[in-house]
Image (spheres, helix red, strand yellow):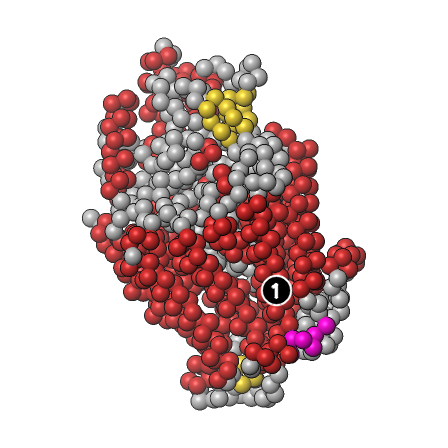
Amino acid sequence: MNAMMLCYALLIGLALPLGLYMGRALDSDRPSPLDRLFGPVESVLMRLAGVDRRASMSWSAYLLAVLKLHLLLVALAWLVFMGQGVLPLNPDGIPGMNWDTALHTAVSFATNTNQQHYSGQAQLSYLSQTLAIVTLQFLTPATGLAVLLAITRTLLRRQPATNAGGGVGNYYVDLTRIVMRVLLPLSLIVALLLVWQGVPATYQGAERVMMLDGGAAQVIPRGPVAPMVAIKQLGTNGGGWYGPNSTVPLENPTGLSNLIETIALMLIPVASLIAVGVISGRRRLMMGIGSVMIVFSLITTSLIVASERLPNAALAGLVVEGSPNLEGKELRFGSDLSALWGSWTTQTSNGSVNAMHDSFNPLGGLGLLMDMFVNVTFGGIGVGLIGYLLYLMLAAFIGSLMIGRAPELFGKPLETREMRWISLAILAQPLIILGLSAITVTFPGLTGNSNPGFHGLSQVLYEFTSAFANNGSGFEGLGDATPWWNLTCVVALAVGRFLPMLVPLAVAGWLAGKRTAPQGRGSLAVESGAFVGLTAGVIVIVNLLGFLPALVLGPIAEQLVLAP
Amino acid sequence: MSFASFLNSTRRDNTGGAVTALRFTLLMAGLLGLLYPLVIVGLGQLAFPHQADGSLLSDREGRVVGSALIGQKFSGDRYFQGRPSAVDYAADAVAGSNLAPSNPALRQRAEADAQRITARDGVPPGRIPADLLTASGSGVDPHISPESAAVQVARIARVRGLAPSAVTALVQRYSDRGNLGEPRVNVLALNLALDGRE
């Protein structure tokens, strides 16, 4: 538990100053001294891209700009993956990817998911790993944060912005600021620290050596790994250079690199909450939201850490009694640091791993799934808090009715149009995850299971859950490089990314156009402890209603079978 | 709002269309996808050339024998042996076993490995350190636990005609107390030292 508490303390200690910095650096309505430092470069970039910096977009234009840019990002990545065989920066001579895996990979990275149905070191050229993947690993978390900024300006800010011109902000300006002021500087620092610890940074191809015992050949894949691993961790991306991600010593060599990567994966999601508190002036609301998230986080993390300290049932009577479950884990991290990473990576929709989740004990796997169902325990960059706001809107609707008021949020009426879209965005999750899982297990030829019994169902459930949550981790034994898995996951990825992210933006835009009712003593107090508790209750109940039966048939049944 | 009125409302904005999106995409791809990795490779090669190239180990004759970070397959009795690997230490095919605790295949593999370890080092079932019976996530874990090294010392000393205390001293030299992780021994470095080749 010591290591776990140290990581939580370090996380909060670093997220506080970063969040305060982000609150100043990203608020485009308030000039800051940082504008002098970053302004000149940003204005050159904006001029090169042909963006009118002062033009503020309406919410609908912002939304369309997001979709337009992402269509281009998918196209760019898809073309590079399929054409990598004839493109430069391919010292190991890797051929082009087939169309369906390339499409899945492009959508997976364009949705900040990084679900991988391939092994990077064997199936992607250096050009694919950098030009296609690293670019998307910057722009997709930046998009989540940009949309959050737009919602903050429209819905959360106490004083309406003076110079927003009625719009919600400029998408390209927001993206550029987030990349230049937050993601790029942090990535430069983390990447260099990782090179120091042993993560490769070279354009040379793989090194071929003769193994000491017996002299068989061993091929050691290399590349510009460190720059990717840094933004992979910082940007709630998760897609690594090597197939098994940060279990591989070249991607995560030491105890220190593991600490850096662990903190990095949670840092910006936590800091974003503080930044929004600064920009909106709603510090109490953000404190309330933050405390719900930290409680959720501690609950599942404790469950998973405790689970992985238990012995692996398959080894009973063979290993020293009381050994933790080390199957799929690296010795340098052991069970606690692997469980902590697994928990944080599923809470934040990062999806990188430093141990193989398929081999976790059943209750550990249960915790990972619960993290991904909830998906707002800090959550992905920007989208974690946006997802929480979605639940908050539902709770405001329910809470208003409970106190006998017409449903309202921040004094604006929540009406049929808003509630229809909010409900759709929340219900799409169980509909898509359970629907696609049901179809897949109905045709056993489609599942590609590597493990039998109840765990086989968990593998299918995990894959769709991970896709919809834009997480990207997997029960990796699953044979998922098939057209069925690629195409169904594309649906889950796209709906799971854009619906829960863009519906709150639309609702914010709709509410901004309505008249504000004066706040009185009978109004819904969204910053009160009671309402914070109500929102937490709504999150728990909605998820239990949706997924408890599936959890009983998967990990819980598996645990009952294994129990002595 | 109907879809047509939605599109109309966006048309009033003077915020650039597909051309802006395309120019922005290409600009960012150049900056983030090409320039940023190039800068890190450049700085990394300047500051930490050994690590940046993959922490390669050379023997006394200067031949590259492996990477300090990548485990190798050892099966001879003369060498300390590492953890089971789902890919036989093929570094270009890194993977874990992905076997669930409920999968009978995991039990079968562990029983076969346990028999071999009992025959080789005389450790009875129930006393084998867990890392010697579990496959790592990467399949190329370079480490074993100090306990796993300790159970192999007697065999190494016997086969190589060394004093057990000398072998134990060598093990200690290649051990990491694991301040930020678990205590561990680097198997390749230790075996290179045994051969006097480090």
Residue A197 seen from this side: no
Q: Position of residue A380 (x, y in %)?
A: 52, 59
Query: SS at mark 1?
Result: helix
- Above or below, B47 against A491 in this view is above
> Measuring 61% from the left and 32% from the top, which residue is drawn there?
A204
Q: Which residues are magenta?
A: B9-14
The quadrant holding residue A227 is top right
- Which chain is indicated by disc 1? A
Specify few, some or many for label 1: CA neighbours under 10 Å numbering under 14, 14-19, or 20 or more: some
> Measuring 62% from the left and 61% from the top, which residue is drawn there?
A69
> Measuring 73% from the left and 59% from the top, which residue is drawn there?
A49
Q: Residue furthest top?
A: B161
The quadrant holding residue B157 is top left
- Above or below, A26 against B39 in this view is below
Amino acid type shown at disc 1: Lys
> Measuring 25% from the left and 23% from the top, which residue is drawn there?
B119
The quadrant holding residue A24 is bottom right
Q: Position of residue A40 (x, y in %)?
A: 79, 57
User: Is residue A124 left or right of A19 when viewed as pictured?
Assistant: left
Q: Position of residue A58 (x, y in %)?
A: 66, 75
Query: Does A49 appear in magenta?
Result: no
User: Is residue A104 left or right of A28 when viewed as pictured?
Assistant: left
So how many labels did they put on this image? 1
- Above or below, A132 against A49 in this view is above
In this rendered view, identify the residue nearer to me: B76 or B9.
Answer: B9
In this rendered view, identify the residue nearer to me: A62 or A20.
Answer: A62
In this rendered view, identify the residue nearer to me: B113 or A209.
Answer: A209
Q: Position of residue A291 (x, y in %)?
A: 49, 65
Residue A475 seen from this side: yes
Instruction: Residue under label 1, please give it.
Output: A68
Query: Does B13 appear in magenta?
Result: yes
